[in-house]
Image (tube, rainbow, N blue to C red):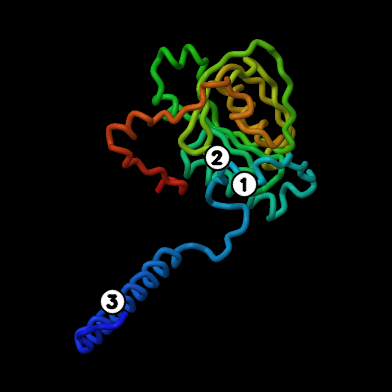
Amino acid sequence: MWCHQPIFCLEKRLINLVYSKRMFSFRKLAHMYRTFWLPNNPVPPYDHVCQIGDPVLRTKAELVNPEEIMSDKIQLIIKKLRKTMKGYDAVGMAAPQIGIPLRIFAVEFSELKKEEFSKEIIQLREISSFPLKVFINPVMKVLNYTKVSFPEACESVKGFSALVPRFLEVRVTGLNERGEEVEWHCRGWPARICQHEMEHLNGGMFIDSMEKGSFEFPLWQKVNTRSGRLYLTFAPHK
């Protein structure tokens, strides 16, 4: 644009140039700061949980060669699986959720976690605590075909939940992290957790089994009271 005041226009251009350089430098510095602590091109097994849409969550997991269970590779996967599950304060996690399409899952429900529920809910949902259990190449057999529906959530569908019907009683067999044969007969809440993780190993998710129309964001009320200022983090708890 032609200007009647060439000196003023020259000053304005210089100011804009300096400002744009400062903004560029600030943005570049901010980007460098944000990415400094992040690994370059992270590869699985991840320290974070894969989110719905990631193809690994829709892939049927492959069997683990029993002879490789004590290998550094499989032991690292198990270690990462346990670490990530604990970091997200989850009660179960399958290998596909950390980017590994192998038939491995871990579950744990501590007494401390149990205290988060009321006595009425504990009784209604048949909630019981159990120590950390790792299953490799698990096989599940339904022992009681009665189905009950209760809310479920998943770290791979962050922030949402739904009512999901599950079998009341199952038996899970497989190998543990030491390659030993293990068997677990579980009912109620533990059985629900196992079915949830088995679904992951078959390329499924709880949204595939949920009751139609029950899918929700449990914190919807907070979204309203905070005028939409509610933020979800996809990183593990510190």
Residue type at tag 3: Tyr
Closer to the chain start, of discs 3 and 1, is 3
Amino acid carrying mark 1 in the image = Asp
Q: Secondary structure at mark 3?
A: helix
Expressed as whole percent of the image width and height from the top left, the position of residue 221 reads 34, 28
Foreground disc of the pair 1, 2 = 1
- Residue 35 x, y percent position in the rendering: 45, 65
**Sequence order check: which comes first, mark 1 or mark 2?**
1
* CA–CA distance in space, label 3 to label 1: 40 Å
Question: Which residue corresponds to the image point at 67% horizontal and 46% vertical from the top-left?
Answer: 56
Query: Circle 1 sits in a helix, a strand or a loop, which is it?
Result: loop
At label 2, which amino acid type do we have? Answer: Ser
Residue at image mark 2: 156
Mark 3, residues whose alpha carbon is within 10 Å: few (<14), some, or many (≥20)? few
Query: Which residue, given by chain and number where applicable, does mark 1 sit on?
Result: 54
Dot 1 crowding, Cα within 10 Å, few <14, some 14–19, many 20+: few
Q: Which residue is mark 3?
A: 19
Q: Quadrant of the N terminus?
A: bottom left
Give the image quarter of residue 41: bottom right
> Residue 33 or 139: which is nearer the viewer?
33
Give neighbour class at mark 2: few <14, some 14-19, many 20+ (Cα, 10 Å): many
Instruction: Work out how far the residue at label 1 is from the one at label 2, CA to CA, in angstroms.
Output: 9 Å
Residue found at x 27% / y 84%: 14
Q: Residue at x 63, y 20 (%)?
A: 186
Q: Is residue 137 above or below residue 41?
A: above
Q: Does the residue at mark 1 contact the one at mark 2 (Cβ under 8 Å)?
A: yes
Q: Position of residue 164 (x, y in %)?
A: 57, 21
Pick the front one: 129 or 38: 38
